[in-house]
Amino acid sequence: MALKALDIYKLLPKKNCKECGFPTCLTFAMKLASGKADPDTCPYLDEATKHLLKGATRPPIRRVKIGVGERSFAIGEEIVLFRHDKSFVHPPGILFQVPDLQTAEEIRRVASRVKDEVFPRVGELLRVNGIAIRNDSGSPETFGKAVRVVEETAEFPEVLIAGSPASMEAALAECGNYRPLIHAATAENHGAMCALAKRSGAPLVVKARGIDALQELAATCEAAGVQDLVLDPAPETTCEFLQTATMIRRMALARTAPELGYPVYLDATVPGREEATLSLGILKYASVIVTTPREPASLLPALTLRQNIYTDPQKPIQMTPGIYRVNNPAPGDPLLLTVNFSLTYFTLLGYLESSRIPCFLLLVDTEGFSVLTAVASGKLNENLIRDSLQRFGVEAETGHRILVLPGYAAPLSGRVEEATGWKVLVGPRDAAEVPEFLEQSWKKAAPGGSPGPAPGP
Ligand code: SF4
């Protein structure tokens, strides 16, 4: 259970000695409650109280960073079980797995894909996060060589998968300061793996089947001084992963088991159920997912799912308001108005680009709401449209005063004409019908496709 500041204050020595760096014990209690102070900084707390405070004041799921630099990613810090309660925080890292028995050329090919392959979608770039290198050979030398090939290709996050501490040491020697994720400390090797994690400053996966064994091993590694842990529940089936990952998330959020307050790892390489496991892990509650290199047709749905699940529903992805040019328009070409909800923009853009009709798109700032929602909430109104036309100097660009409103904004058409003095055409509701609408209605409204200025107000 999380403690409130006053509950914490009751546990403090109340000396107000300032040795913790805060002016009073109450201030220290408030900082502890908000997770901005460490119980260790008060020298007068006994070990039992420190343990209690650490469990009650640290984030329910620890933040762990994998890799360094531009491609590094953070996981953990989740605070809800369900996305409708509040948004999920850090999207899971998805990494392609390569066995160290593959040739250097094969490994390099996968690494190059991870380095360069990007899928633009609704204003964001979707990509795989890194590479997991697996020590199938059992040889430290072969493992080290495979890691070196990846390192030579690009700098991105890696997972090093080996059961042997000797192999892991050889691989870590190739990684320098790149903070790869070490997989894994087990009941058999945790002493050596903890020592390697501490020496290299890299996060460590703790692998054990079943909640009790995982909790015990995580506590052991924590006591050995490794702070950045990731939990691998080693499930035998996808169903078992779902059950275990859900229990881990529940117990971590309830703070009933602080040793489980770490992100979760998922191996999604089991042949025959890779897609299902990958999708399930994105939904329920994996933070690092290792999969076999997938073709784009199979990969893109997973990346899209991840993007959708980890988009804050209260903060839609937005485009910058302004005037956008599609298919190299010239003065006289159609002007369409839409909202700055990026999904609306990209859907409409796709149809317009494939139609090859040159036109202008005016995106107005509805704070990312769709047309229907913006009209219903009053965010899209005649004043916003009038101000946007002026602010972005639209008439100077288009050379006319005819504006196409989206079909769902039809109720505004009269008021927009009155407020702006522009002629308003009401377009279709469905973006797919816009090209046909422009072919027919625009020509009627603006003969010759070059309407010239409409009459002023
Ligand atoms: S060091 Fe401990 S006793 Fe001193 S002010 Fe801070 S919390 Fe209070």
Image (cartoon, grey):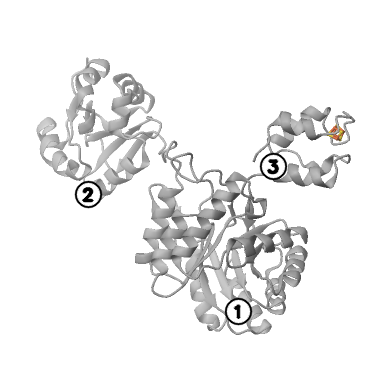
Q: Amino acid at mark 1?
A: Asn
Q: Is residue 429 above or below residue 260?
A: above
- Of residues 347 and 388, the one drawn nearer to the viewer in this rendering: 347
**Disc 2: which residue:** 356
Q: Are marks 1 and 3 in contact (CB under 8 Å)?
A: no
Work out how far the residue at label 1 is from the one at label 2, CA to CA, in angstroms: 52 Å
Numbered disc 1: secondary structure: loop
**Disc 3: which residue:** 56
In the rendering, which numbered label is found on residue 135?
1
Which residue does the image show at 40% across and 49% down from the upper left?
308
> Relative to 96, is 181 on the left or the right?
right
Tell me residue 202's x, y (percent).
69, 62
Q: Which of label 1 and label 3 is nearer to you? A: 3
Q: Rate crowding at label 2 as few (under 14), some (14 to 19) or many (20 or more) other CA atoms within 10 Å.
A: few
Q: Rate crowding at label 3 as few (under 14), some (14 to 19) or many (20 or more) other CA atoms within 10 Å.
A: many
Work out how far the residue at label 1 is from the one at label 3, CA to CA, in angstroms: 39 Å
